Amino acid sequence: MDFQVVVLAGGVSKKLLPLVSHELPNALLPVANRPVLSYVVELLELSNLKDLIVVVEGKDTALNVGAWISGAYADRLHVEVAAVPEDVGTAGAIRAIARHLYAKDILIVSGDLVSDVPIGAVAATHRRHDAVVTALLCNTPVSGPLESVSSGGKDKAKKPGRYDLIGLDPTKQFLLHIATGAEVEKDLRIQKSILRSVGQVEIRADLMDAHLYAFKRSVLLEVLDQNGEFHSLKHDVLPYLVRSQLKSEVLLNGTPQAEENGTEKVISQSNQQMLSQILANASEPTFHLRHELSTNGSDSVRRTHKCCVYIAGSNKYCARLNSLQAYNDINRDVIGEASHLSGYSFSSHNNIIDPTAELGAKTTVGPHCMLGEGSQMGDKCSVKRSVIGRHCRIGANVKVVNSVVMNHVTIGDGCSIQGSVICSNVQLQERATLKDCQVGAGYMVTAGSDCKGEVLTKK
Amino acid sequence: MDARRPPRAVIDPKVRTVGFFTPPDPIQFDSNSLSPVMIPPPCHSSENLDLHSPPSVTPPSGDESVSVTGSYNGSSSELFPAPMSPALSQKIVAGDGGVGGGIVASSFPRGGGVPVCKLTTVSVVNTDSFAFDERDKPNKGGGSSMEVKDQAMNSKQKNEKSSKAERRALQEAQRAAKAEGNKATGTVTSGNLKSAKATKPPQKVDNTSVAASEKKGVDRPSEKDRKKDVPHPRMQYDDKSRVEKAKRRAVVNHTESRNRVELFRHLPQYEHGSQLPDLEAKFFQLEPVHPSVYKVGLQYLSGDISGGNARCIAMLQAFQDAIKDYTVPPEKTLVRDLTAKISSYVSFLIECRPLSISMGNAIRFLKSQIAKLPLTLSESESKTSLQSDIERFIYEKIILADKVIVEHAVTKIRDGDVLLTYGSSSAVEMILLRAHELGKQFQVVVVDSRPSLKGKLLLRRLVEKGLTCTYTHINAVSFIMHEVTRVFLGASSVLSNGTVYSGVGTASVAMVAHAFHVPVIVCCEAFKFHERVQLDSICSNELGDPDVISKVSGRGDVNHLDAWANAENLQLLNLIYDATPSDYVSIIVTDYGMIPPTSVPVVVREYSREQVWI
């Protein structure tokens, strides 16, 4: 279908710091014991997109990611990994691989997307409207634990995170305005010209830009080429295209015919005009077209381009792993309400316990839990709504609630872990109590320590 | 056979008086030559496609990928990290430079840059199998195919023998009969016949479908008669088993809507809500459909393109794109494979929305052009020739035709006229604008109807150009008709009994006009004429989305039918077309001049044959 797919897998994000490192870049962060990148790759595979370019920041990370992909998807996908220097931003990443892009349209996906939205639908919308860019919008995810544990409840009522402010036309097909929630301080500036020609703009705060875009290649590369300062697709390129949609400066590969000569050409041009007239009259004119046609006296023809959106249905899951909170949420959802994403089959108790895992006496593993292979648990443990990785050794009388425990973690007797993330190779000595903590890889928590809301990393 | 002949002899002259021929023989019922106008997707042809198209599309890619895999596996399968890292580092340099230099694409020599490190080259199981299939074929059948080539002339005969003997006998008889007929009329097609025989490429008979197409090939020389074959019976959608069968094949996932009006059960009607998202979601799975065709299909389905001319143009342009990107797969001939390909596109488009008659004619034109391509042309030459043929069709049959129609019809507009039009017709719009340009003083009444409200769009454009307009809905047509001096109507098609097949409501407008003795002028390009005869608008029609008639756009409060859609005793009917009997039509303006409805068969007979389809 003449689409190329670029997966922006990122590098080592500062926002996820204690969890990620050069050995474990963003893309490989396990969500329900699978690297987060696999969710995107499998979503693409489901849409029959088997030819991917994965862009990774940093050389070492690229090696890591490449090694994982080749191990996991050999014989299934054709993946090319490109390494770009760190901190070039998403726009820089696309610039760096620009010469490998040749298809008519480019699908750019963020590597941290966990979703089940059919990608084909975005591409089809893009094609149908012949848009310059089409963005996938989804409902903002519910953050924070759904049913907080009885004790918690004090500061859980925080206001929902502000994501994006998005302006749509009445048909909900075109993007008229986009601003990141964080950037908007008090007032929102909307262009008069857009408002005037559309007549009605709907501003939505409950939608989120899912970082899945379909771009027309020629336009994307031209914009990147002309605006060297653009750093990010979301913050620079997309708003630029949306802003300039009624006074388009991008070269929209005009009339491609040029081979006829002389009178032929004049005829064919008037024909083209008539053809496009007939085609245009056939349907309800979009505001773009109306704007183009309403050249009241001005000499130049107004040129426009379309920025479209595809709004995912409310029954689709869509989230991005871009913060610690999101990491907890996504883990919870993938083994919870969006369990079809995880690709595992759940037992009758609504949980997944690997057959090689060993459970001690009187140990209970509640619903929405996951226990990786080779993990051992002592007696009288209790696990609720948590993910436990592979080959963990957990002592007796341990409580794990709403937490993520990665691989090869040793947890001593009598520990209590709540709402925390514990990275690989961490050692928890006896009777440690962690609440809302993030423990970096290889850290050792001393016996009896009591931490609340702390970030523990190895110096 | 003999039993059948006498009645034909009786029937023939009768029909001829209307300029219209019965098929030479009802049995010679050729599944492949169905006229594309028929609304439902006929089973045979697309079954063929299903059988044929996947190998025809995938083999090249499959082959490639396999060969590629081979080379990669050899070099880098186990030593993955070793060959990896140099490639990676190079890539990083490239990235660096790109960011620094600003212009990436040009700053690096293309050849020197190692392609972004290839990590895994992969062949999927499917393609593998395809590839092997393809490879096996030549190996296994190499000898035999050579043989076949040696006796190219005879092979056809053989093939025919392999097909059913009965049919063959029948066909021979038919041919003889035809030859006689031809002699009688004086047109000798034998030369033509011979050439076609000679050019027929040897082909293996895979199954009956190929045999069928072979037969068609034999018939092709007598092109004149082929058109008159019995049309393929339209699929009747109240026939449950056939609907099931068709559904299994379908690309677009249709859900039959539940409450269909009894009288229209034979027409396809689907739940409209689920079609578009479903087709969209399958975007990348539909490899055999060309992106341009796919886009047009989506636009039909979503209603972005409507109106006979626009749909036809969009389709032809998509086919033009598809032909441009087309390459003949190995071991196939362009004529055959491209025809199959176009047919597959057509059946895809039919699934998105039933074809209009004009599109059917255009498709028939294209297919006959493909069939007529001389085999001596190279692939690129034939592609260019086809593209220019399409270009020519669009120009001559639509644009030029419209210009001529406008020039004719404008003479019927006088100062002080009040012209009434219904819906939105591109030809009528051009006429009105042209008359306005010429400085004629007249008023326009735009009559519109729900749910499409196309008249609004026309009205907007007319008012922008400065015409004096009145806008009303069809309920008021009897009131407004008092003041009207002429009625201009567009048409989706004009059938050979003079019936005008057009957007629903046209018939009532024409009848009201007739009752008030107002002349009704129908503007229709000749490529929309069709030899079919239709007496009512029931047997062949299109059903639209029933929901749109129960909803009023912009009026959320008018929702009385909201939860009623599934009520047992409610049936919603949204007809798209209706048929206006020729009695109510005063004159038809076409590119061949202004003709009375009774002369339509003449146009169909004389012009469509010589200038359009041949």
Image (cartoon, rainbow, N blue to C red):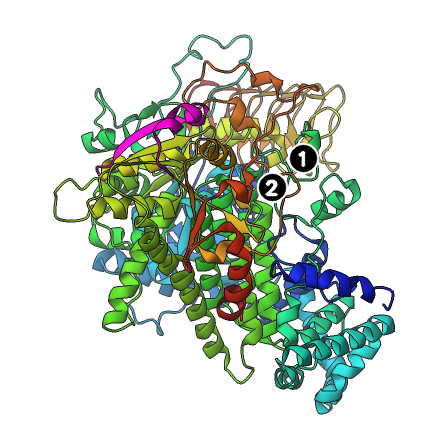
The quadrant of the image that shows the N terminus of chain B is bottom right
Q: Residue at x 19, y 29 (%)?
A: A192
Q: In the picture provided, is B123 more to the left or to the right than B417?
A: right
Provide the residue designation for mark 2: B541
Neighbour class for label 2 at 10 Å: few (<14), some, many (≥20)?
Answer: many
Could you say which disc has been placed on residue A130 in the image? none
Looking at the picture, how far across and down is residue B184, in whole percent? Answer: 68, 79
Looking at the picture, how far across and down is residue B313, in whole percent? Answer: 43, 55
Q: Earlier in the sequence, mark 2 or mark 1?
A: 1
The front one of B586 and A132 is B586
The front one of B480 and A318 is B480
Provide the residue designation for mark 1: B264
Q: In the picture provided, is A328 more to the left or to the right than A179?
A: right
State yes or no: discs 2 and 1 in contact (Cβ < 8 Å).
Answer: yes
Q: Residue at x 50, y 31 (%)?
A: A444
Placement of B571 over or under A111, stated as above or below:
above
Using the image, name the chain to which the residue with label 2 belongs.
B
Q: Which residue is drawn at 34% across and 44% down?
A: B429
Q: What stretch is highlighted in magenta?
A: B466-486
Does the magenta-highlighted stretch encompass residue A40? no
Q: In the picture provided, is A51 more to the left or to the right than B443?
A: right
Please tell me whether mark 2 sits on a helix, a strand or a loop.
Answer: loop
Q: How far apart are marks 2 and 1 (CA)?
A: 9 Å
Furthest residue in direction front, as rendered? B517
Neighbour class for label 1 at 10 Å: few (<14), some, many (≥20)?
Answer: many
Residue A445 can be seen in this image: no
Furthest residue in direction bottom, as rendered? B150
